[in-house]
């Protein structure tokens, strides 16, 4: 699938179809057409560790592109507002929305759901972060925020999962 997508990349790019827009449907089709043996092979602890290592590298790629060696980029106050105010407010707002979407699920699961759905990663939509119509300041803030928010929110998920397990067992 990746080879086919790569061969057609230029044509797809002209039609504004990036890699995620083509690979997700392809993955769905492959997932629906394979046998359960593939699912069993991928549903292992080794596969989980491989996925964790890949995510560890990918989650912070955007943050490594920060110019000037500044941890919070060229607009540290704006990045701080986005990460330390907007992200927690968004996580808080996502919990009741998650409960509305999944009313049968326990409230203890909603922080985990929020940590999954709230962080926006602009890596799949690189065109947004590189669009010259946006000011350099906005592009920089989006780039830095995109690199940090995943790690901040996903870093909460194991602790929240542990709390959920304790509530379920206890």
Image (cartoon, rainbow, N blue to C red):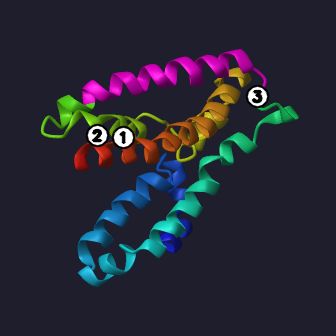
| Image position of 18 (left or right of 112) | right
Q: Residues within 10 Å of mark 2 (few under 14, many from 20)?
A: some
- The image quadrant that residue 151 belongs to is top right
| Image position of 15 (left or right of 68) | left
Disc 2 target residue? 109
Residue displayed at 29% across by 84% down = 37
Disc 1 target residue? 112
Q: Residues within 10 Å of mark 1 (few under 14, many from 20)?
A: many
Q: CA distance from mark 2 to mark 1?
A: 5 Å
> Helix or strand or loop: what does disc 2 sit on?
helix
Residue 134 x/y as whole percent? 64, 24
Disc 3 target residue? 73
Residue 117 x/y as whole percent? 38, 38
Quadrant where the N terminus is found in the figure? bottom left
> Helix or strand or loop: what does disc 3 sit on?
loop
> Helix or strand or loop: what does disc 1 sit on?
helix
Q: CA distance from mark 3 to mark 2?
A: 34 Å
Residue displayed at 28% across by 36% down = 108
Front residue of 130/142: it is 142
Q: CA distance from mark 3 to mark 1?
A: 28 Å
Quadrant where the C terminus is found in the figure? top left
Tell me if residue 29 comes above or below residue 151 in the rendering: below
- Magenta region: 72-97
Residue 121 x/y as whole percent? 53, 41
Residue 159 x/y as whole percent? 45, 43
Determine whether label 2 and label 1 are within 8 Å by CB: yes
Q: Judge whether residue 133 is colored magenta.
A: no
Residue 146 appears in the figure? yes
């Amino acid at each position: 699938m990746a080879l086919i997508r790569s061969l057609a990349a230029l044509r797809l790019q002209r039609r504004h179809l990036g890699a995620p827009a083509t690979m997700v449907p392809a993955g769905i089709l492959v997932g629906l057409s394979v046998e359960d043996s593939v699912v069993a092979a991928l549903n292992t602890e080794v596969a989980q560790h491989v996925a964790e290592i890949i995510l560890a590298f990918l989650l912070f790629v955007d943050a490594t592109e920060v110019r000037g060696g500044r941890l919070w980029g060229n607009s540290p106050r704006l990045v701080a507002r986005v990460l330390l105010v907007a992200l927690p407010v968004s996580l808080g707002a996502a919990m009741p929305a998650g409960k509305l979407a999944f009313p049968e699920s326990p409230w203890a699961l909603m922080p985990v759901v929020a940590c999954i759905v709230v962080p926006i990663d602009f890596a799949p939509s690189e065109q947004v972060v590189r669009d010259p119509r946006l000011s350099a300041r906005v592009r920089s803030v989006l780039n830095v925020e995109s690199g940090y928010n995943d790690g901040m929110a996903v870093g909460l998920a194991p602790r929240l999962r542990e709390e959920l397990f304790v509530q379920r067992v206890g």
